[in-house]
């Protein structure tokens, strides 16, 4: 409820919200700090922070490499929590954790929820945990009031979307196309039909991610989605031009 | 398997949402095939005409005499077309793909045997084929790469992570989520999300069905023990399944001990305390991982056993103490391989040689009127570079050097 309300409040002033993605510890927590600062100061509404995992099955080459490099520099789950606690105290936008289920499972589900709650995290995106596998996870999400963000995809049937919607909270993450993160998506007529199906299936706000890279992409989503997600694009930008380039890039998206 | 794909505590289907619909279709087709006796008949016909089923059960009289205990029988999965048990699973899934009308298949491979079998099936059934293989495995199983390419498959070298089997699996999943509509992922072992573990074990169960009949014919009673190597667990499940309900048969899975159980450089998931429960690659099982849940590097001289996870069905049988797990080190494996070649004129794959080690350690302690079966999952020809290297064979070295000179001058 909390997260959804926060987003709805923001939607009163903006025609589309912006969510960005960072991989914790890549290239370093210090750079993450600077990137988040630039993002928030330039009007990002929500940030998903990925806790790196050695087997990021749903991620494309850019985020895959970021996960691996972060782990090589020694990033631990405990560091991610400490960092999250610091950041959520500092900025007044919702922060989410994105990671793979094993990170939570290994930490102990309840311990993980408890610690995330203490650190001010508002939601979880877990791409390899369908609700059928997440019974206890969903119960804990309810108990700790952390939104489980569920995922719609172009291959989801109407029936499946309706079912997913009953388990989800906060918002629904609509994956723009088949495939992994990183590649460009086409926002054509088919895509509009897909988004209309998403809208019909849920009352939750719709975020659209995978392959959003430019102002034009975001323009195309206005009126159809509530939030646009920028993922790999800023990681590439930081690699090429450094953290300072993020602010101007975000500012130019609006 | 329960409704959610679990075997006791293990298994499940931890899949990205984009694959949900494909898995629904796969489960439906699989369950239709299981109920249809004509499907199994079609499968048996294919395996007896295109592959070499039933494969023989060979009595190893020299090895039996050498150890002086139980009679040693070898189930010859090496005599399958493409040289390993992998063909059983692949041809079965191939029939399924034809029914589902998909036009393209992808697969991961470690030793290259599964990739090789998939490339073969794709050629025969007229399907496009892409094989993912870790860089380390491409180097150590070069002959299989050559044959896969010659049969028309695209072999993609995976350079991420530990550059072995698990990384090839991740990359195959990335392909699948991108090309779900026309592509089937021919999973190579009894791992991954449901229904793969059960389905692969089903196709492989033909091994044990034949072996039980053969041992009854030759030996007049059930074997005392059955040995199989365990990578993902498909050849082991294949031979074990038929014997699970036989009260007097003990089943032994032999894992890759690498440089030794205490070395940290091994792939022992069930017979060492190093693995812990986890969820990765779409299923829950015992994984070699650190305290944060990050997968560790594994090591084995045998590419096909060099893997962080293990079949959820085997984790369940381990829980229930229905299968005993042991391990064999790289060194023990080379010794068992050499002995088997010299005594029987048979060349087991490095993977299969692990099962031989397990059996050799125990055969002498069993009575002479007992029998044991070793599942020889594959033939060693693919390992010629690794084996020649390990034996430091001088004439082979000279041959390679001369060939290298010839190529670099041409
Ligand atoms: C000859 C052979 N035996 C065994 C294995 C291990 O797989 P599994 O444990 O699924 O039988 C492989 C895998 O590549 C193989 O090629």
Image: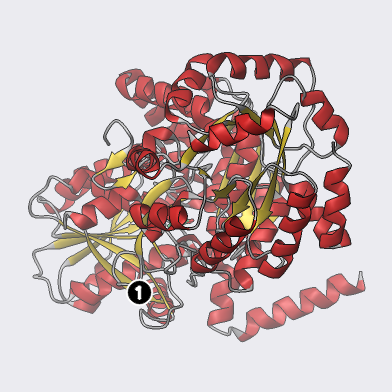
Q: Looking at mark 1, is its residue's CB closer than 8 Å to ligand 1?
A: no
**Residue A66, picture quadrant:** bottom right
Q: At x 32% / y 68%, what residue is drawn?
A: B356
Give the left or right position of residue A222, taking residue A133 as reference: right
Quadrant of the rendered image holding ligand 1:
bottom left
Q: At x 85% / y 37%, what residue is drawn?
A: A214
Give the left or right position of residue B399, taking residue A219 as reference: left
Give the left or right position of residue B205, taking residue A103 as reference: left
Q: Chain of mark 1?
A: B
Snapshot colouring = secondary structure
**Residue A138, picture quadrant:** top left
User: What x and y, as percent, mark residue B193?
Assistant: 43, 41
User: What x and y, as percent, mark residue B58?
Assistant: 30, 57
Residue furthest to the right: B410
Query: Residue B311 or A220: which is nearer the viewer?
Result: A220
User: What x and y, as percent, mark residue B381?
Assistant: 54, 63
How many residues crowd around disc 1 within 10 Å: few (fewer than 14), some, or many (20 or more)?
Answer: many
Q: What residue did someone put label 1 on?
A: B328
Q: Is residue B317 above or below residue B201?
A: below
Q: Is residue A166 above or below residue A140?
A: above
Q: At x 61% / y 34%, what residue is drawn?
A: A7
User: What x and y, as percent, mark residue B89?
Assistant: 44, 40
């Amino acid at each position: 409820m909390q997260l959804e309300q926060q987003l709805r409040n923001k939607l009163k002033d903006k025609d589309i919200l912006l969510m960005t993605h960072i991989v914790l510890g890549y290239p370093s927590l210090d750079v993450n700090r600077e990137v988040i600062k630039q993002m928030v100061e330039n009007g990002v509404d929500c940030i998903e922070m990925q806790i790196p995992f050695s087997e990021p099955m749903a991620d494309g080459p850019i985020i895959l490499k970021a996960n691996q490099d972060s782990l090589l520099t020694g990033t631990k789950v405990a560091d991610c929590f400490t960092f999250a606690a610091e950041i959520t105290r500092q900025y007044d936008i919702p922060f989410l954790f994105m990671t793979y289920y094993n990170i939570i499972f290994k930490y102990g589900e309840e311990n993980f929820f408890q610690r995330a709650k203490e650190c001010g995290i508002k939601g979880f995106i877990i791409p390899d945990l369908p609700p059928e596998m997440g019974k206890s996870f969903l119960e804990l999400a309810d108990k700790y009031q952390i939104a489980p963000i569920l995922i719609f995809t172009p291959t989801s049937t109407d029936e499946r979307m309706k079912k997913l919607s009953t388990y989800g909270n906060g918002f629904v993450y609509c994956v723009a196309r088949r495939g992994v993160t990183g590649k460009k998506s086409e926002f054509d007529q088919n895509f509009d039909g897909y988004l209309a199906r998403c809208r019909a299936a849920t009352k939750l706000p719709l975020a659209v991610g995978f392959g959003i890279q430019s102002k034009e992409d975001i323009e195309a989503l206005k009126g159809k989605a509530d939030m646009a997600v920028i993922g790999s694009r800023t990681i590439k930008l930081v690699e090429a031009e450094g953290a300072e380039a993020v602010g101007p890039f975000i500012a130019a998206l609006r | 398997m329960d409704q959610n794909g679990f075997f006791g505590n293990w298994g499940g289907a931890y899949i990205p949402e984009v694959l949900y619909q494909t898995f629904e279709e796969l489960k439906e087709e699989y369950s239709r095939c299981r109920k249809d006796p004509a499907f199994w008949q079609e499968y048996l016909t294919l395996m007896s005409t295109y592959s070499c089923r039933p494969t023989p059960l060979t009595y190893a009289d020299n090895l039996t005499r050498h150890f002086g205990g139980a009679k040693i029988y070898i189930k010859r999965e090496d005599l399958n077309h493409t040289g390993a048990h992998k063909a059983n699973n692949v041809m079965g899934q191939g029939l399924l793909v034809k029914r589902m009308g998909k036009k393209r298949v992808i697969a991961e491979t470690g030793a290259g045997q599964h990739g090789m079998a998939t490339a073969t099936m794709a050629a025969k059934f007229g399907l496009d084929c892409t094989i993912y293989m870790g860089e380390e495995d491409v180097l150590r199983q070069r002959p299989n790469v050559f044959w896969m390419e010659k049969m028309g498959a695209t072999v993609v070298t995976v350079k991420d992570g530990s550059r072995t089997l698990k990384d090839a699996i991740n990359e195959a999943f990335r392909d699948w989520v991108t090309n779900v509509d026309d592509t089937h992922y021919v999973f190579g072992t009894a791992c991954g999300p449901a229904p793969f573990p059960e389905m692969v074990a089903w196709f492989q169960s033909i091994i044990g069905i034949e072996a039980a009949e053969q041992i009854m014919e030759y030996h007049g009673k059930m074997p005392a023990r059955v040995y199989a190597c365990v990578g993902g667990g498909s050849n082991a499940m294949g031979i074990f399944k038929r014997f699970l309900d036989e009260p007097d048969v003990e089943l032994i899975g032999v894992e890759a001990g690498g440089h030794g159980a205490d070395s940290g450089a091994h792939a022992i998931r069930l017979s060492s305390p190093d693995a812990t429960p986890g969820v990765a690659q779409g299923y829950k099982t015992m994984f070699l991982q650190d305290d944060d849940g990050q997968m560790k590097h594994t090591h084995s001289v045998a590419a096909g056993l060099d893997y962080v996870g293990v079949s959820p069905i085997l984790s369940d049988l381990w829980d229930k103490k229905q299968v005993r797990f042991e391990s064999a080190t790289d060194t023990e494996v080379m010794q068992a391989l050499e002995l088997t070649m010299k005594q029987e004129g048979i060349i087991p794959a490095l993977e299969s040689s692990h099962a031989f080690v397990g059996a050799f350690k125990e055969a002498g302690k069993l009575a002479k009127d007992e029998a044991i079966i070793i599942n020889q999952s594959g033939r060693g020809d693919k390992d010629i570079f690794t084996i020649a290297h390990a034996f430091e064979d001088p004439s082979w070295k000279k041959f390679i050097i001369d060939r290298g000179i010839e190529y670099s001058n041409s």
